[in-house]
Amino acid sequence: MTLTALSGFWHPLATSDEVTDQPRRFELLDDYVVAFRDENGVAAFRDLCIHRGAALSLGWVRNGNLVCPYHGWQYDRTGACVKIPSRPADAPIPGNARAFAYNVQEKYGLVWVAIDEPRDEIPPFPGDIFEDAAWKSFISYREVWKTSAARAVENFMDFSHFPYVHEGLLGTEDKAEIAPYTVEKRENGLHYWLEQEEPSDLYGAGGVQKVRYEYTLVVPFTIHLKKIELGTGRETFITQFTLPRTSKTTEVFVFIVRNHSHDQPDSKFSDFTNTIMEQDRVVVESQRPEELPDSLREELHIKVPDAASLLYRQRLASLAKVDVFGPYGA
Ligand code: FES
Ligand code: CO
């Protein structure tokens, strides 16, 4: 999938507290972004001054304007150049003296950026749980993986590796067979579920118990896993927001959002999840090529266990082809 097809989606750049009045450089889609905050909120531009190409992230904010570190041109939060100090104060400023301003929003404690006009909303949670006091959320895991975003998401969607990569935690080798399951196609992604006995005493609920896993994919790179403990009814979301920094490096933000155990420390939940993520990272970073193959003819797909992953690959391929505001494909 080409990177340009991704420029119309919201991507999670950083946590809100990382974007301050000190401009800072971030990486997105094989390029750099500068983000900063003034009293009107966060602004984000391509990290490049139109004058001579200096990195705006080396500059500073003055009176709400971003000052280029090289010749001091000043850009307002819309990207318009409002001052060229080397020219007389009353000299007109060329209309094309602009920074490349990106769309920016804050949600879930993250700063989200869309380079082009966003074709979709910021990836929603299933249900408005994030605003609901019955649910408690925190970022459990955040790492840069040496892989593409699509590989990192496809791994999260995949459960037939549980008995191997997460032996004893999420699966056991004697239960490697995957029963047929249905993948529902949604306008913005995919949804499917399965149930199994989780071999570990996941969250101290008291021994092995049956767990229902509901997966909700939001294209291109958000995957929610809702775990429902069928004995206790407790529900826990493990949600990966995925930042395509380059075609071969990807930052993953994993949230845990739970409707139970608010009195327990978050670490009780993060330890397990972070162990799983690190087990995944080793295998995923070994995959070649780093990017998903463009053609479904490459690699081998097994009908039942790879059903969700196949549809994901088809969906990504169709996204890469449609016009910016075109409908989603198959
Ligand atoms: Fe930015 Fe000259 S390069 S002001
Ligand atoms: Co895994």
Image: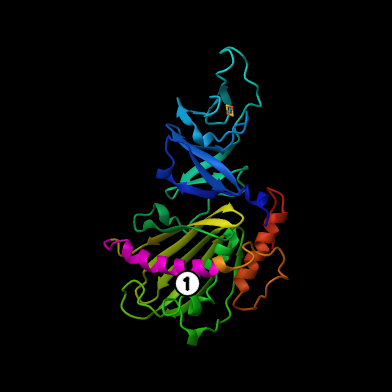
Q: Secondary structure at mark 1?
A: strand
**Is residue 105 in the magenta section?**
no
Picture quadrant where residue 320 is located: bottom right
Picture quadrant where residue 257 is located: bottom left
The residue shown at (62%, 19%) is: 93
Q: Position of residue 85 (x, y in %)?
A: 55, 18
Q: How many marks?
A: 1
Q: Nearer the viewer, residue 22 or 253?
A: 22
Q: Position of residue 326 (x, y in %)?
A: 70, 51
Residue 22 is at least partly visible in this image = yes
Vertical comparison of 40 with 124: above or below: above
| The magenta segment | 263-284
Q: Quick one: which residue is furthest to the bottom in this view?
A: 174
Q: Nearer the viewer, residue 44 or 144?
A: 144
**On the image, numbered disc 1 is attached to which residue?**
213
Magenta stretch, main secondary structure class: helix
Q: Position of residue 117 (x, y in %)?
A: 62, 42
Q: Quadrant of the C terminus?
A: bottom right
The residue shown at (42%, 57%) is: 129
Q: Nearer the viewer, residue 133 or 86?
A: 86
Q: Position of residue 169 (x, y in %)?
A: 41, 76
Residue 42 is at least partly visible in this image = no
The residue shown at (46%, 70%) is: 279
Q: Quick one: which residue is furthest to the left in this view?
A: 263
Q: Nearer the viewer, residue 147 or 323?
A: 147
